[in-house]
Amino acid sequence: MNRKRTAGIIIGLSLLIGLSSFRSDYFEIAKQLEIFTSLYKKVNMNYVEEVDPAKLMNTAIDAMMKDLDPYTKFYDEQQVEDARINKGSGLNSIGASVENQKGKIVFSKIYQNMPSDKAGLKIGDEIVEVDGIQTTEDQENTMNLLKGAPGTKLNLKVERNGRIKEVSLERKQIKIPAVPYFSLTDKDIGYIKLDKFIRSASKEVKEAVEQLKEKGATKIILDLRGNPGGLLSEAVNVANIFIPQDVTITFTKSVVEEYNDSYQTRNEAVDTEIPLVVLIDGKSASASEIVSGSIQDLDRGVVIGERSFGKGLVQRPMKLSYGTSTKITISRYHTPSGRCIQALTYADGKSRRNDTSKYTAFETKNGRTVYDSGGIMPDIETLDQKINKDFIKALKNDFLIDDYATSFSYQASEVDSLDFKLTNADYKGFKQLVNKADFQFETATQKAFQQLKKAGKEDFARGIDKEIKDLEESIEEQADNLVNDQQKWIRQAIEKEIIRRYYYEKGVYRYALENEKEISMAIDVLNDPERYRSILNP
């Protein structure tokens, strides 16, 4: 009787505390809503100038969302309608991608045998007019002009190498494949490039694996570099190709219990024994990390490359009133070992990378140590300490590599083969382009030195001005020499862009097979069975 009485008291107290907490939260929400509503009305009715109520509300909502994370978003009626139209018309109705390059909207990708390709458009063409409407530097607006119902005509004016060219083409419903390239390499190693996790991803990967095995593949490389993710269900299905049925690939945890879920493989695997390498880099995120993380945690294959992006958050779309909607981060996902690989924390609209000292250790199926809170760390890291990725990224962001590749294609009618290499004279031309563009890049050393100068102004005034000036000149000279010091990696970036202009995306993938360090290391590991086993069974 005493035990029952005690249990009843505990249950009663728990319910009371829970109800009290719920009432407290509900009261706080109601209180803040009332304050906001009062303020919103006062501002709209009394502000000295006329106020647009919808614009003011959207500003408030956007500010609230920015205080959370970059994936939690609000969509107004127009944005919801635009998304519906885009979904219906097809995002790639002419088979090309565009981007804003220094205020000019240019074609950045042309897909082979698509309407844009058949019409003679080239990478680097600047869009001047779309159906008589002059374009601006607004990339989204230009994209909307290019889109339309399949079968409709489109007339463009583009500028190429200083000349205006008129082009007519017909929009089509186009599907850009999830697997743009796969092939047999090194006699018995199959290579598969997976670009995105759309609804057909697992189907395309499965077909690629089966075809490669028919051609003699006894080992597989799955390339997830640059893959930003996509559908969670497809991540599970792709992993299922190599992992048996009824195995947990990922599970989610949330403050809302109904959002807690576990995702298991549902189908018979294609091959649970074939040696497997998964390639990742800093742009491999979300679904890519679910696949690479599960392969690593289950010791199903070797992960090679660079630390992944570290997105461990799950979003869910939700409908709101008056045709609006939202997408809210509802949970975090965890890999089979239990780790959450979310690498960033968000506060006050800013992001901060998690401190490595706070990483928690987990174990894979075979007892290997892996860590949470920082993306997927590969089993074999390929990042060369000599490469300055920030510098090369800055060259790309300033479109100097694109500009040189485009101007090169104007001068050369074709390149001999996919084994194309820049000559020393070619690279000298690139350096001249960089100098002419007055390209500016501040190295980490320069940033640190400026902070040092700022912090020690008084000390510098005490007779060490000359030494400081000499040091500053030396640091600047080192920065100027980066174009020479980073020549190996800059050459590769330029060569890929030039090949893209002649041999499309397939040419770039074939170039990668022959030249990229990550693929070479993957082949070496797969060709060394003892090393492969020792990595997975230390």
Image (cartoon, rainbow, N blue to C red):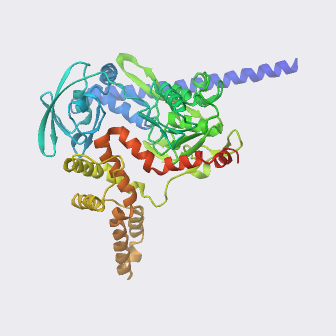
Residue 370: image location, x then y, percent = 64, 45
Farthest residue to the bottom: give it. Answer: 463
- Residue 452 visible in image: yes
Residue 531 x %, y %: 65, 49
Residue 136 percent location from the top left of the image: 18, 37
Figure quadrant of residue 148:
top left
Quadrant into which the N terminus falls? top right
Residue under the point 71% across and 43% down: 367
Position of 523 with respect to 45 (left or right) is: right
Outermost right residue: 1
Image quarter for residue 36?
top left
Q: In which quarter of the image is residue 372?
A: top right
Residue 185 at what x, y percent from top left?
A: 49, 41
> Looking at the image, which is closer to me, 64 or 446?
446
Above or below for 193 versus 515: above
Residue 207, placed above or below residue 1: below
For the point 25% across and 32% down, which residue is it? 117
Task: Please report the residue visible at 28 percent of the width from the left and 49 percent of the height from the top.
Answer: 399
Q: Which of 52 and 132 is in front in this view?
A: 132
Residue 264 visible? The answer is: no
* In this view, 440 is above or below 99: below
Left or right side of 408 for 472: right
Question: Depth check: 61 or 290 in front?
Answer: 290
**How many dots with numbers?**
0
